[in-house]
Image: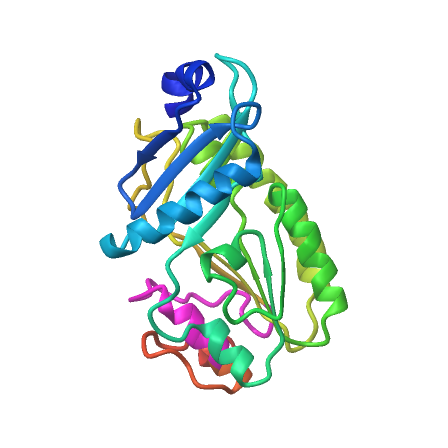
Amino acid sequence: MILDDLGEQHMKTGELILYTSADSVFQIAAHKDVVPLEELYRVCRIARKHCDDYRIGRIIARPFVGEPGSFQRTYERQDFARPPHSPTMLDIAQENGVPTYGIGKIEDLFTGRGLDGAVHTEGDADGLQHTLRMIDEMDGGLIMVNLVDLDMVYGHRENPEGYAVGLGVIDGFLPDLTAALGANDVMMFVADHGNDPTDGSTDHTREYVPLLVAGLNAAGVDLGIRATYADVAATICDGFGIPAPSAGKSFLEDIT
């Protein structure tokens, strides 16, 4: 882990830890006792401007705490992303009067676009609690949630035991989540990439990712292997009766 390799040197010198990975991100890490949080964010905003020419998708602020040998990232991570290059599902929903709400790092990933409200979270249990709250509070609309622990806390750290615990946290919320759905509500669990915690690498992996749908008549329906992740957005827009982004094919008919 990069913090184990360079964290002690950073604490002695104050030099920022800069690193990247196989995906289009540039990450800047700093110990909170060495670099104040707002200073780290300021540096990342500067890096965002310089990285635009290279079409780097995100600059990620990675604050951490602890002592050498036991460094821990905090949930004060922030993503400074390039704006989406075309209208997204969130943009289209908002433009057509569908209330939208982001939970987790959704606001960061979409640079605040297409959202009527948003909240950052401290782990998956916190994100799922916010999800239950918003299902109860919103009178219809679109809630988009990012659960980060399986990726950030366990997958990249090659921790299969922790990964199992993280899956259990999500699984424990499913009864309450499904019970909260109304007659016309749909809930989808998807992933945007793999993150096998046993493959010997800290990078994202390329296995097929899940698409689990609850609500309407989805129970027992085999949606098959989809051609593109964009099918999710196309289905959501179809359900709201609004135009869909240019990519993707709706599977709404399969679950109604």
Residue 174 or 54: which is nearer the viewer? 54
Indicate the colouring scheme.
rainbow
Q: Nearer the viewer, residue 245 or 214?
A: 245
Left or right of 92, for residue 177: right
Query: As drawn, is 250 to the left or to the right of 113?
Result: left
Query: Which quarter of the figure has residue 2?
Result: top left
Residue 216 on the magenta segment: yes
Instruction: Find residue 250 and report its horizontal and vertical position in percent.
Output: 40, 77
> Picture coordinates of residue 177 (x, y %)?
67, 58
* Extreme residue toward the left, this view: 54
Q: How many circles with numbers are drawn on the protein?
A: 0
Image spot of residue 212 (x, y percent): 49, 59
Name the residue at 52% across, 16% down.
70
Q: Main secondary structure of the magenta part?
A: loop
Quarter where residue 4 is shown: top left
Q: Is residue 1 visible?
A: no
Tell me which residue sits at (42%, 76%) in the image: 234
Instruction: Please tell me which residue lies in front, 177 or 245.
Output: 245
Q: Quadrant of the N terminus?
A: top left
Residue 52 relative to residue 98: left or right: left
Query: Does residue 152 appear in the picture of this structure?
Result: yes
Residue positioned 36% across, 45% down in the render = 47
Q: Is residue 9 magenta?
A: no
- The residue positioned 56% from the left and 32% from the top of the image is 36
- Where does the magenta region start and end? 215-237
State the image coordinates of residue 215 (x, y, percent, origin top left).
60, 69
